[in-house]
Image: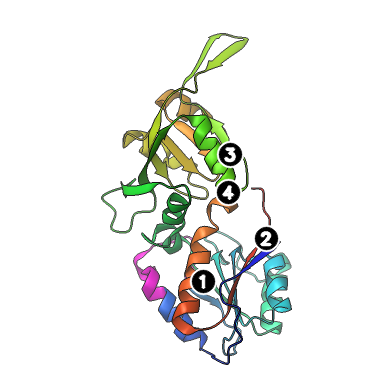
Amino acid sequence: MTTHNISTEPSNTAITVQALTTFCDDYLSADAFKDYAPNGLQVDGGRPIKRIITGVTACEALIDAAIADNADAIMVHHGYFWKGEPAPITGMKGQRIRKLMQHGISLIGYHLPLDAHPVIGNNAKLADALNMTVIGALYPSESHPVGNIATCTPQNAQSLITHITQTLGRLPLHISANYSAPNSTSAHIDDNRIIEHVGICTGGAQDMIEQAALMGCDAFISGEISERTTHIARELGIDYFACGHHATERGGIQALGHIVSQAFGIPVTFVDIDNPA
């Protein structure tokens, strides 16, 4: 677990959870999205907010970090109450929510709005971190597209792997577009292919690879990989880089925390709970 303080100055400023949520809702255009979980306030801890913890996922370790920091609110990308999950607040979910309520900690989560934001969204921040320039959307007809097309310095796959590893702190799994199996016991991969146009959609967006190929991208970057992704990449002739769901989605919530700290003058600390997935 690592922490990053956006604001460490002591502050007597306190805001209501409603003011914080309204600010974030408006900034992220949260109402414009039909999502898999509720965006905004998910658990009301019932007390004014003077300190905030941010993180990718509202796991118990993040809650414990917020308790240790005496935080009044947690802001995350992956919150609770996902579509299709059991409704009863029991078991692991019950334990998490019980800790929040017992310590008066509010939980605020933003999923697709935090992926899609053109400035501080996960896709935009990943492109920035990789020194890529966003030039359009993977789905240009959408009013708030989730997924982007970016350009980068022309390079081969190995160069991009090195850059991703240095930036995210983990080695991506790479599926080469140039794959041939001349016989049943050997295969050949040519990594001299130049990559310049890259589709980006963080997290579990591996199935957008077909859209990236349709839009003429040389490569597609996301977080996860499925068994089918390998065959799709090879057969459509597009390089694929699975960089980790967690690793690709740290940027957005950190950027939102920075915006909130500047807007309200309260301490915000990002806590990175290590997750290899």
**Disc 2 or disc 4, which is closer to the eye?**
4
Q: State the CA–CA distance, disc 4 to disc 1.
A: 19 Å
Please report the residue visible at 49 percent of the width from the left and 50 percent of the height from the top: 202
- Residue count near mark 1 (Cα–Cα under 10 Å), binned few <14, some 14–19, many ≥20: many
At numbered mark 3, what does the secondary structure look like: helix, strand or loop? loop
What's the mark number on residue 168? 4
Q: Is residue 240 visible?
A: yes
Instruction: Give coordinates of residue 149: x percent, y percent.
Output: 35, 44
Q: Are marks 2 and 4 in contact (CB under 8 Å)?
A: no
Secondary element at image label 2: loop
Residue 184 counted in the magenta span: no
The answer to whether mark 4 and mark 1 are in CB contact below 8 A is: no
How many angstroms separate mark 2 from mark 1 (CA)? 16 Å
- Which of the labelled discs sits on residue 244, or is there none? none
* Real-space Cα separation, disc 2 to disc 4, in angstroms: 14 Å
Q: Amino acid at mark 2?
A: Ile
**Quarter occupied by the N terminus:** bottom right
Q: Are marks 4 and 3 in contact (CB under 8 Å)?
A: yes
Query: Farthest residue in the bottom direction?
Result: 12
Which disc is residue 273 wearing?
2
Dot 2 crowding, Cα within 10 Å, few <14, some 14–19, many 20+: some
Q: Amino acid at mark 3?
A: Pro
Task: Look at mark 1 in the image and give the residue it sits on.
Answer: 257
Q: Would you place residue 60 above or below residue 169 in this image?
A: below
x%, y% of residue 131? 43, 47
Name which of mark 3 and mark 1 comes first in the sequence.
3
* Range of residues picked out in magenta: 25-39
Q: CA distance from mark 3 to mark 1?
A: 27 Å
Q: Position of residue 228 (x, y in %)?
A: 52, 32
Label 4's element? helix
| Residue at image mark 3 | 172
